[in-house]
Amino acid sequence: MNKVPMTVVGEKALRDELNQLKSVERPKVINAISEAREHGDLKENAEYHAAREQQGFIEGRIQEIEGKLSNSQVIDVTKMPKTGKVIFGVTVNLLNLDTDEEVRYRIVGEDEAEIKAGKVSLTSPVARALIGKEEGDIVTVRTPRGDVEYEINKVEHI
């Protein structure tokens, strides 16, 4: 299976969630199932069924996170040479040439993407247009509303 790129921050967030699920949520739901069993008839016990459903969700999420972590390739851009080139993990300051609006994006893995926080997935149209380009380059990004031209003002390894 192919390795999936992930930032150091993204890996830490997944490990923290995994730890929370295993050490807090899993014991809590096991306790809830145990308490619900003590109430008697399991067929008509809504608390029991809700707890079992929650347990299924937690176990599924644990497996999902463990799978992602086992297939991840953690990339720390702060330890890479600063070449001015756009690569995975960098933060890019762009100038929209049509509107003179400045935007800032960090190129991250798919699980870390959050457009409102300025984090775009490596597979997004913006990131695909930027990868391999350098400071000062003009790039064209294809969007649903048409092509947008950006100038790469700054590439940061933060």
Image (spheres, rainbow, N blue to C red):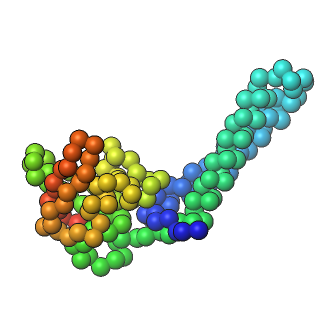
The foreground one among 149 and 21 is: 149
Q: Residue at x 84, y 20 (%)?
A: 44
**Residue 145 coordinates in the image, percent (x, y):** 23, 41
Q: Residue at x 48, y 68 (%)?
A: 74
Is 61 situated above or below 127? above
Is 1 situated above or below 102? below
- Tally the marks: 0
- Determine the residue located farthest toward the top in the rendered image: 44
Q: Residue at x 90, y 24 (%)?
A: 40
**Residue 25 coordinates in the image, percent (x, y):** 67, 43
Q: Quadrant of residue 16?
A: bottom right
Is 103 situated above or below 6? above
Q: Quadrant of residue 32?
A: top right
| In this picture, residue 113 sits left or right of residue 24 | left
Whether residue 39 is visible to the viewer of this picture, yes or no, is no
| In this picture, residue 26 sits left or right of residue 98 | right
The foreground one among 7 and 16 is: 7
Q: Residue at x 46, y 58 (%)?
A: 10
Q: Quadrant of residue 156?
A: bottom left
Whether residue 60 is visible to the viewer of this picture, yes or no, is yes
Image quadrant holding the C terminus, namely bottom left
| In this picture, residue 41 sits left or right of residue 36 | right
**Residue 93 coordinates in the image, percent (x, y):** 20, 58
- Determine the residue located farthest toward the right in the rendered image: 40
- Determine the residue located farthest toward the bottom in the rendered image: 81
**Residue 23 coordinates in the image, percent (x, y):** 68, 50
Is 140 situated above or below 38? below
Image quadrant holding the N terminus, namely bottom right
The foreground one among 46 and 133 is: 133
